[in-house]
Image (cartoon, rainbow, N blue to C red):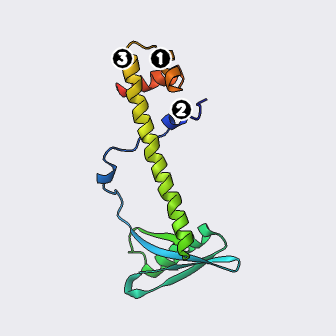
Amino acid sequence: MSSYIEAIFDQADIPENLDQTEAEVEATVYRATATRTGKYWTATVHDLPDGQVVRAQGSTWKEARNNALECVLELLGPTSGTVGVHLSPADPKLDKALKAVGAARTARAYAEQAERDAVRTAAHHLIGNGWSTRDAGSALGLSHQRISQIINQSTD
């Protein structure tokens, strides 16, 4: 069982060239906004071809997003290619709050990657200077098994 500190090593690394990675799937993503209308969410899809607008409802956020996507696909027809709908709150304050969560999650992912990189470097330096895996693990707050794993992965 991994400790909280070791759990980040169970996550995949962020590719070094992530910014240059081309998307393997080309898709058209339409912007939609959602408002609460009674017990339902109403999603309005903007910027469709020929200035068309689509509205869909759902009792949950997910259902409204899925229904909006279905309406867009129905409007565009079978030759529309790969299509998506990005749903965000119509209220700018709520939209900003959700974007802040996304930014925080992205920052966390990069911080975890920085920690993985720093631990790998430190583990190599410690082991390279004659430390045992137990001592290196103790100093880094990791198990000796995790240190062995890190050292062996890095040489593959």
Q: Which part of the image, by quadrant, shows the N terminus?
A: top right
Note whether residue 3 is visible: yes
Q: What x and y, as percent, mark residue 139?
A: 50, 22
Classify 10 Å Cα crowding around label 2: few (below 14), some (14-19), many (20 and above).
some
Classify 10 Å Cα crowding around label 1: few (below 14), some (14-19), many (20 and above).
many
Name which residue lies at 48% across and 40% down.
Answer: 11
Pointer 2: what residue? Answer: 6
Which one is closest to the eye, mark 2 or mark 3?
3
Measure the alpha-carbon separation of dots 2 and 1: 15 Å
When the figure is inspected, residue 97 is found, relative to residue 154, above or below; the finding is: below
Q: What x and y, as percent, mark residue 9?
A: 49, 34
Q: What x and y, as percent, mark residue 114?
A: 41, 39
When the figure is inspected, residue 59 is found, relative to residue 21, above or below; the finding is: below
Name the amino acid type tagged 1: Thr
* Disc on res. 128: 3
Name the amino acid type tagged 3: Gly
Q: Quadrant of residue 111?
A: top left
Closer to the N terminus: mark 2 or mark 3?
A: 2
Name the amino acid type tagged 2: Glu
Closer to the N terminus: mark 2 or mark 1?
A: 2
Q: What x and y, as percent, mark residue 125?
A: 37, 22
* Disc on res. 29: none
